[in-house]
Each structure stands twice: as C-alpha cells, then as structure tokens.
Amino acid sequence: MKFQDLNIITPILKALSEEGYTEPTPIQEKAIPVILQHDDLLGCAQTGTGKTAAFAIPLLQLIYNKKPAHHIQCLILTPTRELAIQIGESFAAYGRHLPIKHLVIYGGVSQHPQTKSLDNGIEILIATPGRLLDLMQQGHVSLKHIEYFVLDEADRMLDMGFINDVRRVVTKLPNKRQTLFFSATMPMEIADLAKNILQHPKYVEVTPVSSTVQAIDQQLYYVDKEEKRNFLTTLLSESHIQSAIIFTRTKHGADRVSKHLNKAGIKSEAIHGDKSQNQRQNALSKFKAGEARVLVATDIAARGIDIENLSHVINFDLPNVPETYVHRIGRTGRAGATGSAISFCDYEELGCLKDIEKLIGKKIKFMNSANSLTQKDKKAEPKENTKKDFRHKKKTNYSKR
Ligand code: AMP
C-alpha cells in the first residue's frame, strides 16, 4: 500500500516523500482511514511502530480541511517532555507545507515563550499534563474549542502517576469531539479510562509486544555485577558498535557508567531524571550529532527519545518488568530497520531474564561469558570469590541453560 491510497492531501504527501517515507507502517495503514472518517480510535501500539505519524497525518488533514482557526482545535497529551518534543517535530515535518501552527508545552522551563506563542494563536497544542493544567489555571489556555483530543501513551501516564491530571484535563474538554487513545498495554485502569472518554471507538492493534522484537538480533552475555563496567568498555573498544543507547536501572548507575566510559576514552553522555531539561537536550543533541558515541539512560528519561538509525541497544542492567525490555530494544530496528540488542545478565538478574524470555517467546542468543571475551583484560577477570559465588549457585550453571 502507498500513502496515496489513503486519500491523503497533496501537501502532506509531498512532506512524507521529503521525509523519505515510501509506504505506511501497519498502524498508519489501519488508523489513518479511521481518523479521517471522524471516528474515535483506541490504538494498541507502542513507540517505534510509526504511531505518531498515524495520528499526526490525519489530524493535520482534518484541521486543514476545516480551515485553521488560530485557536486551539487539537490537544495532544503525552507523558514526557521528550515525547512532546518528538511529536512536535513530527507535526512540523508532516505539516511543513500547511498553514497550521502547533506549539509544544512542558514543565521545567520558563513558561514565558510558551504563553507568548499561545497568545499569537495556534491550532495544535502538544502538552505534558502538569504544565497544561498550570497554564489552564493561569488562564493562558482554554480547551473550549477542542475538536480533536489525543491521549498518547496512556499506560505510561498511569505508571508515572499522571492519571488524575489526565482525568482533570478531560473534564475541561467539550463533549463533542473526536478522541484518539493510544496505549502500548491495557491495564484495567487504562481500559476503564478508555471506556469513559471514547465513543464507539474503532479498535486498532499492531503486532503485540512479544512479536515486534523478532526482527532484532538479540545477544546475551553473562557478566558478574562488579565486572559489568569493564566488560562494557572492552566490548565497545573491540567491537564495531558505532553508536548505542545503554540502559541502566538507576540514575546513579547511569552516571557511573558514563564516567567510566569517558575515562576509558569512549565519549558518552548520561540522561536521567536528575538532569535538567537543558542538560538532557544537550546530551541528546551531542549523541545525535555523533559527538558522543554512547548515550547512557534510565528507562524513564529515555522514554520518547527518537533517534533514527540506532544500531545498538545495550542493557547494562536487565529491567525487572519484562515489557520494558521490549520497549528498550524496540528503539533499534525502528520502522523496519534492523538492529541489535546486547544484554548483560548477572546472577541476581536470572529471574528477570527468565521473565523476558517467557514474554518474547524465545531464548536470547547466548554469546559467551564475560570471561572469555575479556580474557585479555586483566582488570575484567572476575574476582575469585565471585567465581565461587557462581559455582555454589550450581542451579544457575550458565553453560547448561
Ligand atoms: P514512532 O512510533 O511514532 O515513534 O515512530 C518511529 C519512527 O519511525 C520515527 O523515527 C518515524 O520518523 C519513523 N516513521 C514513521 N512512519 C514511517 C514510515 N511510514 N516510513 C518510514 N519511517 C517512518
């Protein structure tokens, strides 16, 4: 199927071709016609499937056809600043030949430029819940003309504790509107919220979590906890990995890994919740520009970061929640590209590994132990007591997986 077959107007088709998109992704193929028919939509899709364009393209078209009105006709609510910025970039790209203005608002930065842009009149507002409520309370934002409402990453809103803020925003929306609801998973609370805010929605689902990862080359190394940093350095020094996002479980861990790599001459930047918005954007820009070879991130900070052509994801720590593994590695191999995911697993993480393999329905390819890869590197040899540690936990004999 081609974008032309979806009845998309010429200025948007032109922008899509300039973006290098040749054909719609499955979610786009399914969602665009539904949205153009003015139906509500419940979309079960995760980041990396092309879901932003799946709603941005038809919304731009609907607003253009109705005539842009210089007041807020469309609200997109998304959990993180990074996602908000990324969605804003998508609207800018696909709408570059249309006279439609959008604005991205989020907290942690001065509100002045945001309120100034609001005063100038915009049609599309992309917001995180906190800053939106704040500006609504101050009278800078009115939602009374909203015709299109998108709730993006609803399950993440719940995880991050924003669900009541979302409910408060919804109460201020006109009843007559078109609502698009996206969530990667459907926990009970999210399913209830969807039921309350959608009217006769069409349901669109793309490849369930477990199968989206099949195309990604996944590798596993067993590494003792205290050897992980040295092993990572060796891996990055000896391999052809050009750029990678490295995931750690904690903010502190991200900083430590980043420092260690920089000391070893591997340029890296860390992003996590304790860094200011500017620091995060700087780190991301450096990584995107190739000035930093690796980006070390926690899950929350990395959520919504869109980096094209990412070849590698490294799980320095395995996540406790198996779906997080899928989200992480989904950052490589986006929109059909191939990618690799390398995971380190220490003794304490064997349970997490089991859960992950259950979710993805296969064993991750076992490469070799850290010892054989790093044997040249004296520092990376496991300490005697660690070896013993593994031996007495004989049930976990790695070679007998
Ligand atoms: P998303 O799921 O919205 O985060 O999109 C994932 C990535 O796929 C983004 O980098 C988009 O620019 C890219 N993308 C979206 N739609 C297409 C398409 N039809 N063809 C190629 N790339 C796309």
Image: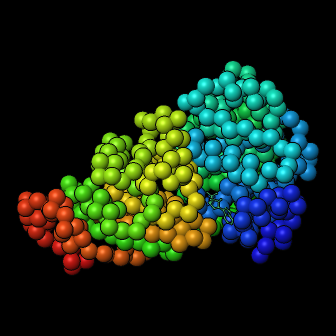
Report the front residue among 312 and 128.
312
Where on the image, by quarter, is ligand 1? bottom right
For this rendering, which residue is in front, 363 or 382? 382
- Quadrant of the rendered image containing residue 121: top right
Residue shown at the point (72%, 61%) measured from the top left? 19
Vertical order, 105 against 202 (above or below): above
* Residue placed most toward the observer, 190 or 27: 27
Looking at the picture, how far across and down is residue 280, in whole percent? 50, 40
**In this view of the protein, can residue 24 be seen by the observer?**
yes
Residue 171 against residue 393 in the figure, above or below: above
In the rendered view of the protein, which quadrant contains the N terminus? bottom right
> At 88% from the left edge and 60% from the top edge, which residue is drawn?
9
Would you identify the image quadrant in which residue 204 lies?
A: bottom right
Left or right of residue 353: residue 325: right
Task: Please report the residue visible at 74 percent of the width from the left and 48 percent of the height from the top.
Answer: 92
Can you say which quadrant of the picture contains the C terminus? bottom left
Report x, y in % for residue 106: 61, 34
The residue at 19%/68% (across/down) is 376
Question: Going by the image, does 89 lie left or right of 267?
Answer: right
